[in-house]
Amino acid sequence: MSSSNLSTTSSVTQRWRGWLQGRDLAVFHSVADRHWPGADPLLPQLSRSANHGLLWFGTAVGIAALGSSARSRRAALRGVASLAVASAAINTVGKGAVRRQRPILDQVPVMRQLKRQPITTSFPSGHAASAAAFATGVALESKGWGAVVAPVAVAVAASRVYTGVHYPSDVLAGAALGVGAAFALRGVVPTRGQLPAPGRPPGEAPALPRGKGLVVVVNQASGTATATASMVREALPLAEVVECAPADLSTAMEKAAGRGQALGVCGGDGTVNLAASVAATHGMPLAVFPGGTLNHFAYDLGIETVQEAAAALTAGDAIQVDLGRFRPGPNGPEGADGYFLNAFSLGAYPELVRTREHWSPRIGGWPAGVLAALHVLRGQRPLEAELQGRRRPLWLLFVGNGLFQRVGPAPGRRHNLADGLLDVRVVHGGRGPGLRMLAAAVAGPLTRSPAHAAVRRRRVRIAGLAPGTPYAYDGEVAHSGTELLIDKLPEALTVYCPMPV
C-alpha cells in the first residue's frame, strides 16, 4: 500500500475516532446537565452497593433462598460464575489495554459524585461488565429471575455515567464484555436447557385433565412438601391429595393405588422410592411432584415445578424408566425385594446419610451434610467385602440406576433413565479417604485408577459382608446380611414426564 493510501486511511480513522469521542463527551455532558427526579439519592447509593460485586452476591443469595428450586439455585450460581469470568477479563486484560482517563467532574453536581472516586482507568466499566454478566447468567438459567434482575443491572450501569465516573462508551463496552463472558461460560458449562434430554422410551398412561383420577400422597415431613401440596391442589383441583406422616406413607400409598388411575407422590427421594415400588407392583403410572430437599429423580425427568408435572398429566405424556433392585430387601430374606430409583451405596456414604439426618433438623441440611462428611471421613474404616468374587477393602461402593455424569455428595444428572445398566463406582481402601473420594468425584464415569474405578454392569454381587453392615438406597438407610445381589428391572415403571418441544 502506498504512503498516500496509508495517510488517507489514517485520516479517516482519526476522523471517526474524533467523531465518536465527540458524541461520547456530548452524551456525558447531557446526562450531567439533566435532572432525573429521584435519581440523585438512589443511583449513587446503588453504584456504591455494586462495589466488589457485593450487590450481586447478595442478590444471588436472595434468588437461591426465595426461589427454593433447583432452577433458582442454578440461576444464582451461573450469575455469580459469569460475574467472576467478566471481572477476571476486565481486570487482567481490559483495564490495561486502553488506559483512558476518568471524566472530569466539573459539570457533575456534587451530590451525585461518589465520596470515593475510583483510581483505575476508565475503559471499560467493570461495574457495567459485572452487572451485565450477572444478569445475563441468571437469565440463561431462569428467564423469570432474569427479568427481575435486568432493571437493576441497567440501573447500575447507568449510575456509572450519572455519577460521572465513566463515559457512556465505557459502560457500553463493559456491558458487551459482561454479556460475552456469560455466553462464553455457557459454551464451557452448558445450561440445563442445552443438555440433551434423558432417554425417553414412551409409556402408556391416561390423560388426567385437572387431575381427575389422580391420588397424590404427600409426606408432611419432606422438604417443601406441604407448600408443594397447596400448589398441586391449585393446579389439579380434581385430584385427591392425602397428607400424612412418614409412618403412614406405605398404608396411604397402598390405599391410593386401589382407588385411582394414577399414583402421585410429593416428597423427597425416599418417599418417591416407596411410591415407585407401589406403582410398579400395581402396574400403574406414577406422577412425581418435587417436594423434597434434593429431588434427584424428578429433576432427571425434567420436572422442576408442579406446573410441568401437571402439564404432563393433562396431556398423558409418560415414559418408561428402569427400576434398580437389591436382594434381599431392607426387611431381610423373608421380606420383599428392595428397589432404588437413583442409587444404592455401601461404605462411607450410608454413615454420612445417617449422621446428616441426625443433625439436619437442628442446623439445616447443608451444614449437616458438611458436618457429617467431616465426621465420617475422619473416623471411618474401610469396608471389607467380596465384590464380583474378589475380596478387597472399600471406602465406598456406589451403584447408580443408569449412568451419572459425576458422583459425590450430590449425584449428577442422568441422560438416559432406561439404559438397562448399573453405574458402578468403587473407591478402594487405603489412606486418605477424603482425597480418594474427591478424585473419584472429579474423574467422572468410566474411569480406572489405583484409588478408584468406574464401570457399567448389569448386575453386581457382594459377599462376605459383616451382618448388620449399613447401606443406603435413595437416601434411606438399612442393614444387610452377608450377601447382596444388585440388578435392574428394565423399563419397569411408567412415569408422567413432559415431552421435549
Image (cartoon, grey):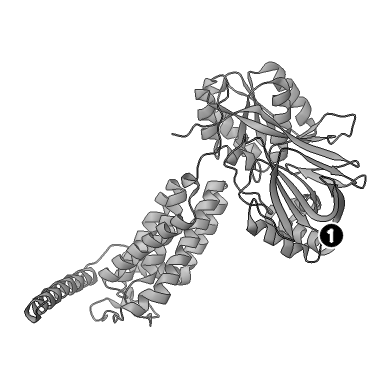
Asked where in the image residue 476 lies, by quadrant, the reply is top right
SS state under label 1? loop
Query: In which quadrant will I find the N terminus?
Result: bottom left
Residue 383 shows in this picture: yes
Horizontal side of residue 397 vs 123, given as left or right: right
Residue 364 shows in this picture: no
| 384 and 160: which is toward the camera | 384
Q: Residue at x 90, y 46 (%)?
A: 464
In the rendering, at what x and y percent does residue 171 appear? 31, 68
Q: Residue furthest front?
A: 389
In the picture shown, does residue 463 fall above or below 408?
Answer: above
Q: Residue furthest top?
A: 259
Q: Residues within 10 Å of mark 1 (few under 14, many from 20)?
A: some
Residue receiving disc 1: 380
Query: In which quadrant will I find the C terminus?
Result: top left
> How many badges with numbers are in the image?
1
Asked where in the image residue 239 lies, by quadrant, the reply is top right
Horizontal side of residue 88 vs 31, given as left or right: right
Amino acid residing under circle 1:
Gln
Q: Residue at x 65, y 38 (%)?
A: 225
In the rendering, at what x and y percent does residue 8 appear? 8, 76
In the rendering, at what x and y percent does residue 422 appear? 69, 41
Q: Residue at x 56, y 29 (%)?
A: 201
In the picture shown, does residue 367 fall above or below 288?
Answer: below
Q: Residue at x 83, y 29 (%)?
A: 336
In the rendering, at what x and y percent does residue 457 appear? 71, 41
Horizontal side of residue 228 vs 192, given as left or right: right
Q: Residue furthest left?
A: 4
